[in-house]
Amino acid sequence: MTANGHALVPLATRLTARANLTDDDRDALFALSYQDKRVDTGGYIAQEGDSPSLCRIILSGFAHRHRFTAQGMRQIIAIHGQGDVLNFPSSPPVPAEDFVQALTPVRVAIVAMEDMLDLGRRCPRIANALLVEMNTEISTIRAWVANMGRRDARGRIAHLLCELALRTDPAGGRDGCVAALYLTQSELADATGMTTVHVNRTLRALEEETYIQRQRRRIMIPNWSRLAALADFRSSPWTRRITTAE
Amino acid sequence: MTANGHALVPLATRLTARANLTDDDRDALFALSYQDKRVDTGGYIAQEGDSPSLCRIILSGFAHRHRFTAQGMRQIIAIHGQGDVLNFPSSPPVPAEDFVQALTPVRVAIVAMEDMLDLGRRCPRIANALLVEMNTEISTIRAWVANMGRRDARGRIAHLLCELALRTDPAGGRDGCVAALYLTQSELADATGMTTVHVNRTLRALEEETYIQRQRRRIMIPNWSRLAALADFRSSPWTRRITTAE
DNA sequence: CGTAGTGTTGAGTCAAGTCAATGGTTGTGG
DNA sequence: CCACAACCATTGACTTGACTCAACACTACG
């Protein structure tokens, strides 16, 4: 890969996983001018009503996307990690309706959306890879809807843990893999549509039934397929995984 | 608009609403070769595992998208109407993971995905319009997640009614508009993550509190902003509306 | 070592689910 | 044109999963 130490490598890696890019494509990508921003844990990476003419990409770290109801309740809609494009380019851009907040220290690349669109026009393979990535995102959110609507507490928590394990641990999906919970129990509650108290009890129940083992905010999954069955979790080749950068 | 009676007019209308197309763009669109398929109420328009190399577009009628859990429970994920693209093109395409079933008699256009991608390459404005449409879809599903996670029964039903009114009635969004429920109460339940019994009681409660008036499967909304407030419903310029074709 | 955020636990309540029966509509075929 | 069947809507009685309220314990960090 060209430009080994280039900051945008996580994006290049992600897009390459979606559709094969040539070295020329990667060179064009690396020629993008961007701003490299660091956000501390708890800081906001994007906000409702943000200027939609900028495209943000997570270079490292984890973040969660959420909205508020009129009554001030929070609903977490997605967990984002390395290589995720936070707002996909289009002209005109669709304005941001939600907040993205750092769960760990995060590095974000900020690119002018016009540059991004231009890149897509010049490199059809990159445009394609972005389309695949958008389709993947759509599929992931739909799975989230199904998760919220038709599963009980244990199933929802289990489903979220499976997703986190895949995105957090390169060994995710195998027995003994570990989901690093960058989320507090209160955030788990907002992600699954439950209350903090009930999340706590559900986690304990899952531990007592040996679905998981806990130590601090790390969840070990001794038997992946057993938990996946409880969660009714389906991973496809398109499921987003952590990009083991470089 | 060129080619007034062309079958693909609903798609052209939708894309034009997303980003301005030229007459040349529309001509290129109308030059697509497609198959025109009719599906009766209750018939399947698309299924899990369908050939992903075909792109389906609703020309008329309504349909719902759903998935099944391992226990056989159904979760409705979206309501689709005229002009909706059921699977967005990308190369490689992301395989279909859900079912789309007709709520009314439906006309579907089936286009080879390769042709669709090719069209996008030749007409950048069409590619752009599709990107906007995809971003809109993403935004809509995210709203659905927030709806499922953090609202009680009345709020969820109210939110769905608002969405249906906008998509079903050209006057949707104004006092006195009517949401045509092509959904049975059992389907409403699967869309909101509730049981049939509870949907029934919630509808009656909304009627008793004069939020709605019912006759058969038509819901009249006497006071839009009152219901929208209960539902915490936010419509943006990007909210999908029915395309009042020609 | 105090403070603030997070995690844990118990007791009581309520929204929503389950089970089960009864009406209402619609469509179809004799 | 009626009778039946199939599906859909409605209602009641009861159960339960999840929420609320409230207290207390743990941990991290200045």
Image: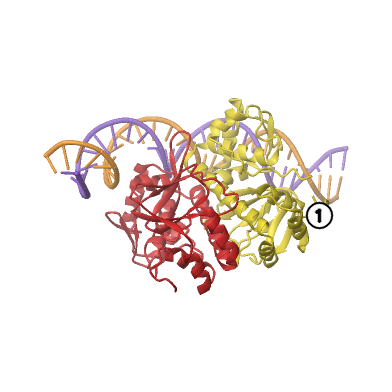
Chain colours: A red, B yellow, C orange, D purple
Secondary structure of the residue carrying tag 1 is loop
Report if residue A88 is visible in the image. no
Identify residue for label 1: B6
Camera-side residue of A4 and A151:
A4
Answer above or below: position of A139 versus B179: below
Determine whether, in the image, residue A234 is placed left or right of residue D25. Answer: right
Q: Determine the image quadrant of residue A198.
A: top left
Camera-side residue of D18 and C13:
D18
Instruction: Identify the residue shown where x is 33% and y is 50%.
Output: A40
Determine whether, in the image, residue A218 is placed left or right of residue B99. Answer: left
Instruction: Identify the residue shown where x is 62% and y is 52%.
Output: B133
Answer above or below: position of B15 versus A82: above
Q: Quadrant of the C terminus of chain A?
A: bottom left
Residue A153 drawn at (x, y percent): 42, 48
The amino acid pointed to by label 1 is: His
Residue B235 drawn at (x, y percent): 59, 38
